[in-house]
Image: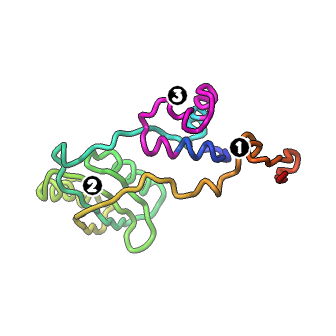
Amino acid sequence: MGDRTLDRTDVEILRLLRKNARLSNKQIASAVRLAPSTCHERIKSLQSSGILRGAHADVDLRGIGLTLEALFFIELAKHERAVVDRFMNETESIPEVRRAFLVSGRYDLIVHVAVKDIEHLRNLAFDRFTNQAVVVAIETSIVFDSRVSNELPFTVLEMKESPSHAQKKGVRLNRAKGRRFDG
């Protein structure tokens, strides 16, 4: 990912897409007050810079028979980059794995899984995790409830103003020095 600086319009586009990735370019352009072609170019730029990585469906896991979620807290025997990377790649490839986090602290990884039932969870732990030589210990916690926020963790006010937005507000930008002047 490059060092692309986001402005308010970029942030608003990202917020709209986080809430509903099925919005059309025309709908997004209208919401952020851009021409559809300009909006399309912005979205392409967000994609090419690696900021916008894709769109995904929010699937009700219970609706497809995955009624139990759990967290595996895993301690690894070796902390060599190649070993950890290989283990993370293998973990990511397991269909039941929702997310895997490499963390600091007592455990090395926290792995979020979704399974059919407690037997499926037990088999997953034994067959895919505890049988690996690199795994020293695994602790399991059942997820009773979870909440997800699709909001971005920064406010629009923290973003750099785009020149067009600044001009609408009566702000002139000194492009040579990167300073702004009200007036």
Question: Disc 3 designates what residue?
Answer: 26
Real-space Cα separation, disc 1 to disc 2, in angstroms: 44 Å
Asked if 174 appears above or below 81 in the picture, the reply is: above
Q: Quadrant of the N terminus?
A: top right
Write the start and end of the magenta stretch as one range.
15-42
Q: Which is more toward the observer, 121 or 29? A: 29
Name the residue located 53 percent from the left edge and 44 percent from the top edge: 14
| Mark with earlier residue (2, 3) | 3
- For mark 2, give the secondary structure: strand
The spot of residue 176 in percent (x, y) is: 88, 46
Q: Residue 93: name its quadrant.
A: top left
Tell which residue pokes out farthest to the left in this image: 119
Say what secondary structure mark 1 lies in. Answer: helix
Q: How many marks?
A: 3
Percent from the top left, x then y, of residue 99?
Answer: 36, 53
Q: Which residue is mark 2?
A: 113
